Image (cartoon, rainbow, N blue to C red):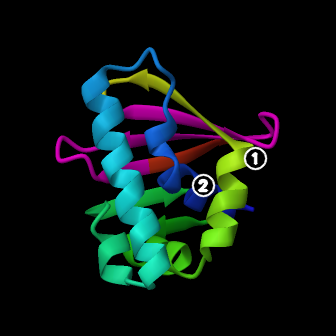
Amino acid sequence: MKVLFLLSTICFLGTVLTDSPPEDVGKGEKLVQSVLKGIELRDKKMIGDVFEDDFVYEGCKKQYNKEESTKLVGSFSLQMASIMEKGTQIVYVGPRKFMTLISSNSLKSVFVLSKNWKLLHGKTISC
């Protein structure tokens, strides 16, 4: 479930709420397109490019670094990405910071992006 959540968050940062600054929405959409294209092409380098080198995702029971996250996201199909898109809500909470809600708020995480608009850190805030 945590792996699915990580994928959904990365794939759908571009669907932030409309109260976010237009620049944030545009850059988020570009990030989303890079991930989706990487999944489609099975290009782990393209997927890995959305993560900062020191990226860490803190799950409930395990931490994932950039390499592990890239491998996990790269293993998903476009069909899975489409399914996750429909069940995930992305909430803009500040400059380069988003909270994700999945499955009727049963799983929440916060993600922070770097100034370069790459994923810097993620953390599950409810398990």
> Is residue 1 rendered to the left or right of residue 35?
right
Crowding at dot 2, Cα within 10 Å, few <14 / some 14-19 / many 20+, comes out as many
Based on the displayed image, in which of its 4 quarters is residue 91 positioned? top right
The residue carrying mark 1 is 127
The residue that appears at 55% across and 50% down in the rendered structure is 9
Q: Is residue 2 depicted above or below 98 in this figure?
A: below
Task: Look at the image and give the residue range highlighted in magenta.
Answer: 96-121
Q: Earlier in the sequence, mark 2 or mark 1?
A: 2
The x, y position of residue 30, in whole percent, is 31, 50
Most common secondary structure along the magenta stretch: strand
Q: Which quadrant: the N terminus?
A: bottom right
Query: In the image, which is nearer the foreground, mark 2 or mark 1?
Result: 2
**Mark seen at residue 8:** 2
100 within the magenta span: yes
Question: From the viewer's perspective, is 37 left or right of 85?
Answer: left
- Which amino acid, mark 2? Ser
Image spot of residue 5 (x, y percent): 65, 55
Kindly state the secondary structure of the residue where label 2 is placed: helix
Residue pictured at 50% horizontal, 68% vertical = 64
Image location (x, y in percent) of residue 95: 31, 25
